[in-house]
Image: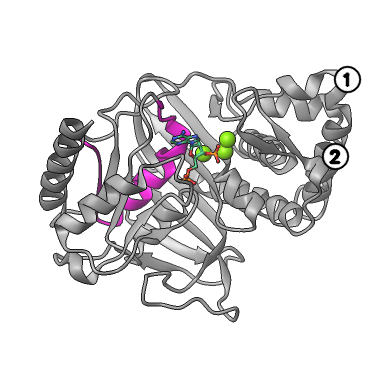
Amino acid sequence: MSYEKELAAAKKAASLAALLCQKVQKALLQSDIHSKSDKSPVTVADYGSQALVSLVLERELPSESFSLVAEEDSGDLRGNSGQETLQRIRTLVNDTLANNEYSSVSNLTTDDVLRAIDNGKSEGGSRGQHWVLDPIDGTKGFLRGDQYAIALALLDEGKVVLGVLACPNLPLTSISGENQQSSQDKLGCLFFATVGTGTYMQPLDGSSLLKVHVSTTENPEEASLFESFEAAHSLHDLSSTIAKKLGFKAPPVRIDSQAKYGALSRGDGAIYLRFPHKGYREKIWDHAAGCIVVTEAGGVVADAAGNPLDFSKGKYLDLETGIIVTNQKLMPLLLKAVKESLEERASSL
Ligand SMILES: Nc1ncnc2c1ncn2[C@@H]1O[C@H](COP(=O)(O)O)[C@@H](OP(=O)(O)O)[C@H]1O
Ligand SMILES: [Mg+2]
Ligand SMILES: [Mg+2]
Ligand SMILES: [Mg+2]
């Protein structure tokens, strides 16, 4: 089955959401940032992005069975304290629609916006098709002015069949360790993949198209390792033990969001390691798009036991703690180093 129509709609939706996020990041007001019940941050851009993607997908792909599993919900926007924020989201969404090809639907009410956000309430699963959305992945990076991604994927019978990653702050050129970033670098990448057809990258303005491949290096000494910027999201000391075992020379590249998967898909680095603290449960929207972007570029994504990720179990990924991403040649070596490091860590605790 081809997913051409779905891909075109997903690229449109993610690109439009990226425009909204860029506008907010440029002029971030303190009043735009809120704390969710789990204390994680959420901004008007997270909500606005979710509403836009939901609206564009529904409009481009009319279907009775539209299902979206997305990170945010409208709960905090419905009370009195949420009204000002809701108005701001509505203005952002309407302005973004009006300035693009959707001017005829840019008169949304606050109820329309709440409904669009809550469209993302599906639970996913192993039957039928479900869209999976992280409207801003890396909200902490977004707030720092660093990396973030709009991550959109499609599940069909429990498998990821399409993924789009919009990374507004990612340079179009490599971010590998030895490449010093310069302020001249052009920013803004869109990665996309459908099952069986490879991974492509284009500038967010759509001006050119490039097929990308993961690094084919077998030698960790010449490779970069990616991990979360936030130490609370991944055990930096554990990845450093693994890196030492493998003989990595370069320090890790720490960046936020699924931009890591995008950068890996074009060979900027060779390994991405993610080891959350005990008890954390990974959500499907944090990995679905990134996973297909890397695998279609020739890479492998696995949990710490070497099993592929299973996206068919609802909102959560059910896995052996840890996510590891690399090319086919390095995976056996990496799994061995991960296993040894985890055993050493367990015996020292
Ligand atoms: N304690 C924790 N351990 C691991 N991941 C966490 C975490 N708390 C939040 N996250 C997830 O880490 C994501 C960001 O990943 P990264 O560290 O690679 O930038 C967050 O996505 P959001 O920013 O969409 O909420 C969130 O889902
Ligand atoms: Mg979040
Ligand atoms: Mg996320
Ligand atoms: Mg998010």
Q: Is residue 278 magenta?
A: no
Q: Which residues are magenta?
A: 280-304
Instruction: Give amino acid for label 2.
Output: Arg
Q: Residue at x 38, y 23 (%)?
A: 279
Q: Which is nearer the N-term, disc 2 or disc 1? A: 1
User: Up-down: is 191 above or below 196?
Assistant: below
Could you say where residue 164 lies in the image, as x and y percent from the top left? 48, 48
Asked if disc 2 is less than 8 Å from ligand 4, the answer is no
Numbered marks: total: 2
Whole-Å distance between the Cαs marked 2 and 1? 14 Å
What numbered label is drawn on residue 80? Answer: 1
Left or right, 205 with respect to 165, comes to: right
Instruction: Give amino acid for label 1.
Output: Asn
Could you say where residue 285 lies in the image, as x and y percent from the top left? 47, 35
Instruction: Look at the image and tell me in which quarter the N terminus lies.
Output: top left
What numbered label is drawn on residue 88? Answer: 2
